[in-house]
Amino acid sequence: LQDDTDHNYYTSKMYGPSDPMSKDLWVNIDQMEKEKVKIHGILSNTHRQAARVNLSFDFPFYGHFLREITVATGGFIYTGDVVHRMLTATQYIAPLMANFDPSVSRNSTVIYFDNGTALVVQWDHVHLQDSYNLGSFTFQATLHRDGRIVFAYKEIPILVTQISSVNHPVKVGLSDAFVVVHRIQQIPNVRRRTIYEYHRVELLKTKITNSSAVEMMPLPTCLQFTSCSACVTSQIGFNCTWCNKLQRCSSGFDRHRQDWVDSSCPDEAKEKACERTVNTTQLYPFTTTLVPKTTPRNRIITTTSPPASTSHLPTSIPTEDDTKIALHLKDNGASPADSTAEHKGGRLHAGLIVGILFIVLIVAAAILVTVYMYHHPTSAASLFFIERRPSRWPAMKFRRGSGHPAYAEVEPIGQEKEGFIVSEQC
């Protein structure tokens, strides 16, 4: 038994062959109701194929509720909404992702079972395409309605670390990402999707053996909060902020990332606290507790941009908070006469020196920012440029030769048929 490992979104616990929990976590499908156990005919007889499976319950994955998943022959489940050919890259639940080919043996099957509270997907007696003589693998993934994910392993003939990843990635764990849609200015009515992975759980491959198991428990996320007060006061390890426009709580890193950015939720989260019911004649609902969180300059710039009543100076006798805001407005509003007089009074060479120093500072800042974004690809600055200048930054743009194997989605018709079925790639 290994102690709980915290992965931010999940905690994992691994059980060895001698632990009784390993046997308890294995689901014996042979003892389940026969009418609910389904052997996928196409997946059981093809290589690098994937098929959609509907769930009878809402399954929470990284805080998002799923009603449909995609089961792949390569020992993993794809959880994304956009089905593409590079399913192994991200958005997966992988008990053992590898180059499995169920078509090389008549005994290989892909089975799934849904009893209303859990879905079990089992890869039964599957072989590696390039290493058939190593033996067959039997393992399963169980998705529980409460968000728990269990990986159970019955037959693992070799060390997972010895499985070749030349023709197919070898992964054990979870991954999620958000999709950003970009418009191509040169080509009207054409959009490009970029998938950006924001989190991954990588489990120790050396712990995956015969009769072992892994149990992953979901941790609270910002998405579970449905009110502003509960969102901003939460202490769950994430910086949860509330977007009044979307009526949503988020850390900014989830599948709704594009809506969050397009709705200017990051700016709103910086500038506003929870809106309370106040008198309509009150022009400034800000409280003094917000002053240390953001600078007055940023507050005024963002709050005066929309045509709202708070963008005007108060006409009545100012309160203490109104006085502070008015003073900041006066300070931030550049006084052309004063600034011009100061520049005219300065000497020419002093202006040149200041200009040179200013340029040097800008160059130095640009270098530091570039280095920072290179080493912190998930920072806000990196995401800002990735989403707005996608052609200049490396991201998960799936093209031919990207190093990921191509998966084809099977046709939904005839998914449950037995025997050998030839399906064309989409």
Image (cartoon, grey):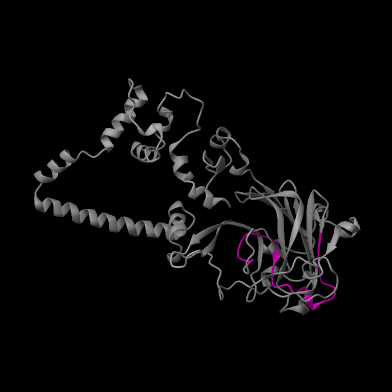
**Left or right for 172, reference 354:** right
Find out whether residue 157 is within the magenta segment.
no
Above or below residue 271? Residue 149 is: below
Q: Which sits in the foreground, 42 or 1? A: 42
Question: Which residues are drawn in magenta?
Answer: 87-112
Can you say whether 236 is above or below 36 in the image?
above
* Whether residue 331 is situated above or below residue 347 in the rendered picture: above
Among the 4 quarters of the image, the one containing residue 197: bottom right
Q: What x and y, as percent, mark residue 201? A: 62, 56
Residue 126 image point, x, y percent: 78, 71
Instruction: Give how far across and how far down residue 18 sits, in percent.
Output: 80, 57
The image position of residue 399, as x and y in percent, is: 55, 72
Query: In the depicted view, which residue is nearer to us: 16 or 423?
Result: 423
Residue 61 seen in render: yes
Image quadrant in which the C terminus is located:
bottom right
Residue 376 visible (yes or no): no
